[in-house]
Structure formats: C-alpha cells, structure tokens
C-alpha cells in the first residue's frame, strides 16, 4: 500500500470520527434544547399559577381590609356613645 493510500485511509477514518462526534454533539444539543423548552413551559405554568394565587390573595386582602375598616368604625361609634350613656 502506498503512502498516499495510507494517508487517504487515515483521512477517511478521521473524517468518519469527526462526523460521529458532530452528530453526537448535535443530538445532545437537540436533547438539551427539548429539555430547556420543557423547563420553560413548566416555569410558565408555575408563574401563571402564582399570578392566580396573587390575584386571589389580593382580592381577599381587600375584602379583609374593608371589613376591618368597618369594624373599626363600628368600635369608634360604640366608644363615642359610651360616655354619653354613662352621663345620662
């Protein structure tokens, strides 16, 4: 076998190894991209759920605040009426 043929065979083998490594790298990147996409979708779902919880808690807080304001106003009325009742 001539030196040229040996060099050609080594070059062919090197190219085949390079193609194998490149294909493996492409497949790995594709798997990572799919995993990243799935993770992003999962995080979007969590964010949506958290936003719904926040909205619900915000409404509840407003309701409680209004009720507390009403209770405080009622207590003020009762406390303002007590001295008048004691004087009579």
Image: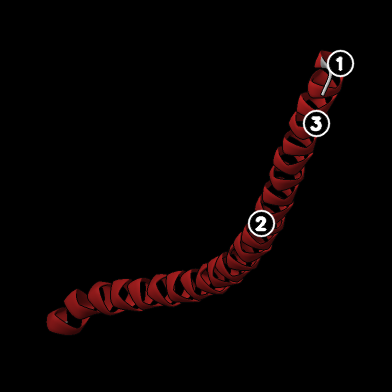
**Most distant residue in the left direction:** 86
- Mark 2 lies on a secondary structure that is helix
Pick the residue in front: 10 or 65.
10
The C terminus sits in image quarter: bottom left
- Mark 3 lies on a secondary structure that is helix
Pick the residue in front: 16 or 44.
16
Q: Is residue 3 left or right of residue 25?
A: right
Of mark 3 and mark 2, the one earlier in the sequence is 3
Residue 49, quarter of picture: bottom right
Q: As displayed, is residue 74 above or below residue 50?
A: below
The residue under label 3 is 15
Of circles 3 and 2, the one toward us is 3
Pick the residue in front: 54 or 32.
32
Q: Is residue 58 left or right of residue 24?
A: left
Q: Point out residue 50 in the picture as x, y percentages from the top left corner.
A: 55, 66
Q: Is residue 51 left or right of residue 21?
A: left
Of circles 3 and 1, the one toward us is 1
The residue under label 1 is 4
Residue 59, quarter of picture: bottom right
Q: Point out residue 56 in the picture as x, y percentages from the top left corner.
A: 56, 74
Of circles 1 and 2, the one toward us is 1
Q: As displayed, is residue 40 above or below residue 53?
A: above
Q: Point out residue 75 in the picture as x, y percentages from the top left corner.
A: 29, 76
Of mark 1 and mark 2, the one earlier in the sequence is 1
Q: CA distance from mark 3 to mark 2?
A: 37 Å
Residue at image location 84% in from the left, 18% down from the top: 2
Numbered mark located on residue 40 in the image: 2
Callout 2: 10 Å neighbours few (<14), some, many (20+)?
A: few
Pick the residue in front: 5 or 60.
5
């Amino acid at each position: 076998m001539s030196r040229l043929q040996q060099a050609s065979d080594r070059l062919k083998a090197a190219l085949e190894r390079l193609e194998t490594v490149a294909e493996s790298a492409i497949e790995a990147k594709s798997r990572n991209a799919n995993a990243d996409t799935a993770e992003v979708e999962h995080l979007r779902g969590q964010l949506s759920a958290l936003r719904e919880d926040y909205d619900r808690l915000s409404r509840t807080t407003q309701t409680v605040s209004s009720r507390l304001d009403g209770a405080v106003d009622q207590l003020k009325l009762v406390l303002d009426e007590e001295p008048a009742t004691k004087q009579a």
